[in-house]
Each structure stands twice: as structure tokens, then as C-alpha cells.
Image (cartoon, coloured by chain):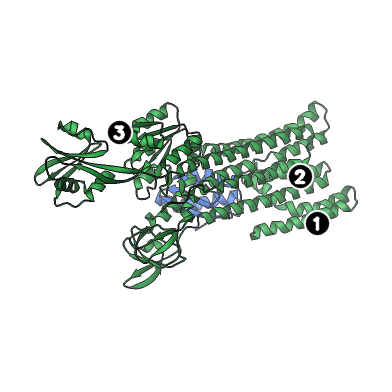
């Protein structure tokens, strides 16, 4: 409890004692008024002052004014105990509300406490403690046991186990040794390690996560924006309603003006929109925080809304459903020796980032490739030893009008020059272990439409799609075909989430309703384009993200219905004269506290991903 | 250019919404966003106008919530 809250608590206690005293002492008239004024002033003076000050600075309609009018009105009609008690009750509620907000802020701050304060960099053999921003890429930093790793890098000395739970929610520590890469924000548990930094602090995992979370609330959800606008019109409307309630029955229908004024005051007290204005943003923010604790970075409350509505999931095959690292299965080389074919291909694929290329380029080569040109969706061409060679898929061979071996069951890179076909190298990719479980989970959660897109050939695509039980798949797609397919689905009225690993999926990630980038922490383009980033590459995070989004929106809706429902009921009861001020104050303050506590539930998301198999 | 400031003693979510609205309408500001829970104010504006914008924002904030201020 901070000083401000402590002071309020003291005032509440003193006022409560004074009020109890005033209730016990029998008095009437002026004396009674004088007895009830002290507790009222002690507990309510700042509200009245704020109300008056706000009128002069232009903020006329707010809760301070409502409470002031209500309680002063109660004094005017002679209800002294009620006036003082209601103000006391209101301030007690405000006190609890402050506590709830402070607590939720603390929880959120604790979640975000991944920021490293310093880095121990080793320069010229001497260890210096500096601010992480000052460490350059390639420098050596030392991280002792118990310290947070400040910058992404590779271990060059030492071995240890690290805890990434504050980043990914993964509770099992992970063993790392020389040659392994480690991410910033993780806690070094057992042994001191020396790490060679692979990027600057501002590009490291922890800095990226922090900046994503800090700016994530800039794009407000439709529901949130609606609430703020609602509150702006609502308060003046209610004050007018109260005035009408206080004046029309007495004037036109000869009602007792004291009675109707009382009802109008109750009307005022219960109508404050605080419950909604505080609880709705809190729910969304809690949802974002709860998700990031599980390694799911969501860029804003709007994304939560879209995710919850998702009914179609489109998945990229390579690198998303599959591991993305290929293994050479077979080499067919009828013309030249196999080693020679592999050597040619390896030389050409050296500079390509495509996973198939990287696999081939891992083989040794004695050639040097020049003029390497990428032929989008088909392959590459290169000049080796003064000859022009082509390396690519069936489409490339068709284009060259070269007779090739078409019946390859796996992904193959065919090699040819302008006249002759030299053979192929076939590679295969491994399905991720949690792939079919994830699709099954998605189906159980109501996503009946799963689609797989790939640039790979049909038979490979079919094998994978069957293994994972995907509803539909489209193969041999060029990057722009993938965009078209997603557009088609969206045009047919579906809310589409697209999952890709980012390397060439940026356009699709941008256009999909919800673009999800997988473990793509190395790819800036993906992070920029995606709406959601899954930091630990696990497919199971996808159904988890959708469930978090649905839970959050559920809580938001609960709060809206609860708050509006209770208030409406009390308003009607108040107008009919059945509710008294106590119920009215509960309708305002009690509902707010309940809504805030309910909203905090969004912070606590079960981490139901299975333990990582190392 | 985007700058993030810490807001101290921000007590009321409704007030935060009002401040955000008014600051967003200042000359030179393309985006203003207040995160009630991390108590941060994010302003996107031309580098040259920032000093002026900060001064005006302080005034707006003080009028709406007198105890609240920007930590510089």
C-alpha cells in the first residue's frame, strides 16, 4: 500500500468512527446535521473539491460531480446519515479499486521484469560492467550463475542450464554448452558462461519483446474504443435523466418532490461508468500479458478480438508444420558422377536462404558458382566453370523444355543446363512432433477448416497433409499464389489465421486477418508483418493463443453484461423507489471492484503445453 | 519519431483516455497512446516539435489529473 492509499484508509477509519458516534448520539435538526457533517467532511472533502475544480477546468461530468450532487442532495432533503454513509461507502470502494489496480499493475510489471540492467563485457582481458546497449556485436560477455543473460549470443566457454520461463513459460530448464545459442532475458542457472554476442542489445530477444509489449496497446480493440466513447455520452445523458426524474413527476404528476429527488440521486450514484472504463482495458491488457508469459507475443487488443473469431487456419508447410531442415535422401545422376552433381549443386546453393538449398549447400564442393540468379518459385541458375546450369523444381525443367525424371516421390532439386538433364537430388523434411496433436486440438476447439499451403510438389504435400489430418491442401504454389488463396478464403467470409515461418511469408502474414509468425526471432520482416509472434517455435502455442483470446473476450463480455445489467436493474429499481442509496453505491463501486477482479483472471493463463522434448 | 515517457501517479483509467485524446489532437502529434497499466505515454511526432509538445502535454495532464505528471 502506498502513501496515498494509506492516507485514504486512515480517513475512512476516522470517518467510520465519527459516523458510528453520530448514529448513536440521539439528536434532531441542526444538531443532527452538525453530528453528521464531520464524518462527511473527513471522508468526502476531496471529492467535492475535485468536482468543483473540474467544472472550472472544463471536465464537468465525472464521478466526483455525481457523488457530490448525490450526497449534497441527500443533505438537502434531510437524509443526513445516508449522505455521510454513502460518501463513506463510496470512498471505501474507491480504496479497494485503487488496491486492485495497483495489484494488477504489480503483476504486469513483474511479468515485464525481463529487462537486464547491466552486462559484464570482457575487453582486453578485463571484465567491465556496462549498460547492455553499449556492448557491440561479437564482443564477449560473462554471465554468472543466477544472472540474467543480457544479450543474445553463442556460448564460447562453460556449460550451464538456463531458465526461459519468464520469456516462454517453459518451466523445465534447458542445458546449454559451448556452441549453443542462448537468448537474452533467460536466467543462467548453474555455471558461469562466456557468451559471444550475436547482435546488439536493441535487436536482442528481450529488447524486442519489451518493445512489442510496450507499444502493443497503441492499437485499441473495437470493444475498448466503444467503451470510451460510450462513457463520454453516457454521463451527461444520465445527469439529464436524473434532472428529469427529479423534476417531471413532481411538476406534472404532483409527485412528492423530496421522494423524486431522492430517486434522482440514487439514479446518479449508480450510473457511473467506471466499472466498464477500467475493467475492459484491464481485461485486454491482462490477456496480452498472460499470452506473453507463454511465449506468445500479441501486438495489440485488436488482434485478440480477431484471434477469438478465427474459424479457418492456414498453415505454411516448410518450417512451420515441418522442421524446415532437410536431409538428402537420394541422388540420381545418370550422366556425371554423384559427387560431381552434388558438388555443382552445393556451389550454386551456397548463397540461398531456402531450407532445401541450405541442406544441399552443406555438402562439400570444389566448384565456384558465379552469376547466381534466383528464379522465383522455380529455383536458381548459376555459371560454374563457364557453363550455365539450372537448379530447381519440375516447373523449371518444364520451362527449359528438358526431359527430366518426373516421378520423384520426394522434394527434388533437378539439375540441368540448357540442353541436358543431369539428374536430381531428393531431400526430405521431418514433420514436427506436435504437428498432428496441434491440428487435432484446433479441431476440438471448433476450428473445422484447416488448410495447408506449400510450394512443394503435390505428392509430398499430400503425404504431410494426410499424416496431420489437415482438411485441405494446395501444392506447387508460388508466393503470390499463397496470397491469393488466403484472399479467397477471406473473401468468402472466413476469419483466417495464417501461420508461417516468415522467410517468404511476409506478404501473406500482412494480408491475413491474424498473421502468426513461428519462432521467427531471426527474421525482422516476419516480426514486422505478423500480428502474433510465437517465440518458442511450438505449434501447440497456436491453439493456446486462440484459447487465450477467446477467454479474454469472454471475460470482457462478462464484465460488460454484468456491469450494465446490474446498473440497469438498480436504475429501474431506483426510479421505482425500491432501491436505496446503499444499493446504488454498490451498483457503482462494488460492480467496479468485481469487474476489476474478474478482469485480472486474464493474466493467469494455464501453460498447458507439454514439456519440451530435448 | 516515437518517444515513450513514464507517467507518475496516474490513478484513473477514464482520465488516461481523456488525456490520450487531447494530446493526440496537439499540433504535430501523429499518434498518442497511454497505457494505463504500465503508466507509459507514447507520443509519435516530429523531432523538432517534441519540446513544445511535452510542455503542452504536461499542462493537459495536470488539468485532468492534478497529481499526475510526466517523469522526464
- The subunit carrying tag 3 is A
Q: Position of residue A138 (x, y in %)?
A: 31, 62
Q: Quadrant of the C terminus of chain A?
A: bottom left
Q: Which mark is residue A90?
A: none
Circles 3, 1 touching at the beta carbon (< 8 Å): no
Q: Which label's residue is closer to the chain start, 2 or 1?
A: 1
Q: Nearer the viewer, residue A475 or B63?
A: A475
The residue to which callout 1 is attached is: A17
Question: Label 3 crowding class (10 Å Cα cut-off): few <14, some 14-19, many 20+?
Answer: some
In this image, A273 relative to A329: left or right? right
Question: Label 2 crowding class (10 Å Cα cut-off): few <14, some 14-19, many 20+?
Answer: many
Question: Which chain is blue in the picture?
Answer: B
Q: Residue at x 70, y 52 (%)?
A: A46
Q: Foreground mark, 3 or 2?
A: 3
Q: Which label's residue is closer to the chain start, 3 or 1?
A: 1
Q: Residue at x 76, y 34 (%)?
A: A573
Question: Can residue A351 be seen in the rendering of this structure?
Answer: no
Q: Position of residue B66 (x, y in %)?
A: 61, 53
Q: State the CA–CA distance, disc 3 to disc 2.
A: 77 Å
Question: Which chain is green in the picture?
Answer: A
Q: State the CA–CA distance, disc 3 to disc 1.
A: 82 Å
Q: Is residue A473 above or below residue A269?
A: above
The residue to which callout 3 is attached is: A459
* Res. A356 image quadrant: top left
Question: Can residue A28 be seen in the rendering of this structure?
Answer: yes
- The subunit carrying tag 1 is A
Looking at the rendered structure, the secondary structure element under dot 1 is helix
Looking at the rendered structure, the secondary structure element under dot 3 is helix
Q: Position of residue A581 (x, y in %)?
A: 77, 41
The residue to which callout 2 is attached is: A71
Amino acid at each position: 500500500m502506498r502513501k496515498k492509499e494509506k492516507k485514504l484508509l486512515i480517513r475512512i477509519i476516522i470517518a467510520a468512527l465519527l459516523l458510528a458516534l453520530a448514529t448513536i448520539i440521539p439528536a434532531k435538526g441542526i444538531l443532527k446535521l452538525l453530528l453528521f457533517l464531520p464524518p462527511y467532511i473527513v471522508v468526502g472533502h476531496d471529492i467535492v473539491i475535485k468536482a468543483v475544480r473540474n467544472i472550472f477546468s472544463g471536465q464537468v461530468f465525472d464521478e466526483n460531480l455525481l457523488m457530490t450532487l448525490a450526497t449534497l442532495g441527500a443533505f438537502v432533503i434531510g437524509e443526513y446519515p445516508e449522505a455521510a454513509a454513502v460518501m463513506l461507502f463510496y470512498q471505501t470502494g474507491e480504496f479497494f479499486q485503487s488496491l486492485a489496480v495497483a495489484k494488477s499493475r504489480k503483476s504486469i510489471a513483474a511479468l515485464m521484469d525481463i529487462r537486464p540492467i547491466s552486462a559484464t563485457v570482457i575487453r582486453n582481458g578485463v571484465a567491465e560492467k556496462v549498460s547492455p546497449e553499449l556492448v557491440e556485436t561479437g564482443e564477449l560477455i560473462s554471465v554468472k550463475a543466477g544472472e540474467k543473460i543480457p544479450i543474445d549470443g553463442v556460448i564460447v566457454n562453460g556449460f550451464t542450464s538456463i531458465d526461459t520461463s519468464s520469456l516462454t513459460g517453459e518451466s523445465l530448464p534447458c542445458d546449454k554448452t559451448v556452441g549453443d545459442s542462448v537468448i537474452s532475458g533467460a536466467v543462467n542457472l548453474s555455471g558461469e558462461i562466456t557468451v559471444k554476442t550475436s547482435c546488439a542489445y536493441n535487436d536482442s530477444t528481450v529488447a524486442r519483446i519489451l518493445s512489442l509489449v510496450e507499444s502493443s496497446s497503441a492499437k485499441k480493440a473495437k470493444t475498448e474504443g466503444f467503451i470510451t466513447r460510450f462513457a463520454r455520452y453516457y454521463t451527461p445523458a444520465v445527469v439529464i435523466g436524473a434532472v428529469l426524474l427529479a423534476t417531471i413527476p413532481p411538476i406534472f404528476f404532483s409527485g412528492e418532490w423530496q421522494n423524486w429527488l431522492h430517486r434522482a440521486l440514487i439514479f446518479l450514484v449508480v450510473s457511473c461508468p467506471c466499472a466498464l472504463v477500467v475493467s475492459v482495458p484491464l481485461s485486454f491488457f491482462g490477456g496480452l500479458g498472460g499470452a506473453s508469459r507463454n511465449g506468445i507475443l500479441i501486438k495489440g487488443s485488436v488482434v485478440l478480438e480477431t484471434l477469438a473469431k478465427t474459424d479457418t487456419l492456414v498453415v505454411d508447410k516448410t518450417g512451420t508444420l515441418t522442421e524446415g531442415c532437410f536431409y538428402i535422401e537420394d541422388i540420381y545422376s545418370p550422366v556425371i558422377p554423384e559427387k560431381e552433381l552434388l558438388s555443382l549443386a552445393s556451389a550454386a546453393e551456397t548463397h540461398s536462404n531456402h531450407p532445401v538449398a541450405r541442406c544441399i549447400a552443406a555438402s562439400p564442393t570444389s566448384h565456384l558458382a558465379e552469376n547466381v540468379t534466383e528464379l522465383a518459385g522455380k529455383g536458381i541458375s548459376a555459371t560454374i566453370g563457364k557453363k550455365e546450369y539450372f537448379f530447381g523444381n519440375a516447373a523449371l525443367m518444364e520451362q527449359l523444355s528438358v526431359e527430366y525424371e518426373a516421378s520423384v516421390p520426394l522434394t527434388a532439386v533437378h539439375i540441368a543446363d540448357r540442353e541436358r538433364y543431369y539428374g536430381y537430388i531428393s531431400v526430405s523434411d521431418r514433420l514436427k512432433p506436435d504437428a498432428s496433436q496441434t491440428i487435432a486440438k484446433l479441431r476440438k476447439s471448433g476450428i473445422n477448416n484447416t488448410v495447408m499451403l506449400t510450394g512443394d510438389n503435390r505428392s509430398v504435400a499430400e503425404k504431410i497433409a494426410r499424416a496431420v489430418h489437415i482438411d485441405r491442401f494446395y501444392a506447387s504454389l508460388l508466393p503470390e499464389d499463397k496470397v491469393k488463396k488466403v484472399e479467397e478464403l477471406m473473401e468468402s467470409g472466413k476469419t483466417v489465421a495464417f501461420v508461417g515461418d516468415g522467410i517468404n511469408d511476409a506478404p501473406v502474414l500482412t494480408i491475413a486477418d491474424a498473421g502468426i509468425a513461428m519462432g521467427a526471432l531471426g527474421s525482422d520482416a516476419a516480426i514486422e508483418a505478423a500480428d502474433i509472434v510465437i517465440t518458442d517455435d511450438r505449434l501447440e502455442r497456436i491453439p493456446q493463443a486462440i484459447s487465450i483470446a477467446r477467454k479474454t473476450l469472454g471475460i470482457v463480455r462478462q464484465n460488460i453484461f454484468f456491469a450494465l445489467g446490474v446498473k440497469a436493474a438498480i436504475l429501474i429499481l431506483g426510479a421505482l423507489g425500491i432501491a436505496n442509496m446503499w444499493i446504488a453505491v454498490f451498483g457503482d463501486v462494488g460492480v467496479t471492484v468485481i469487474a476489476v477482479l474478474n478482469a485480472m483472471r486474464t493474466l493467469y493463463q494455464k501453460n498447458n503445453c507439454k514439456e519440451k522434448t530435448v | 519519431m516515437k518517444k515513450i515517457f513514464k507517467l507518475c501517479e496516474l490513478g484513473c483509467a477514464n482520465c488516461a483516455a481523456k488525456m490520450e485524446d487531447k494530446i493526440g489532437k496537439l499540433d504535430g502529434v501523429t499518434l498518442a497512446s497511454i497505457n494505463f497499466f504500465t503508466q507509459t505515454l507514447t507520443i509519435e511526432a516530429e523531432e523538432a516539435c517534441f519540446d513544445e509538445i511535452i510542455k503542452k502535454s504536461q499542462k493537459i495532464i495536470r488539468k485532468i489529473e492534478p497529481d499526475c505528471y510526466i517523469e522526464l
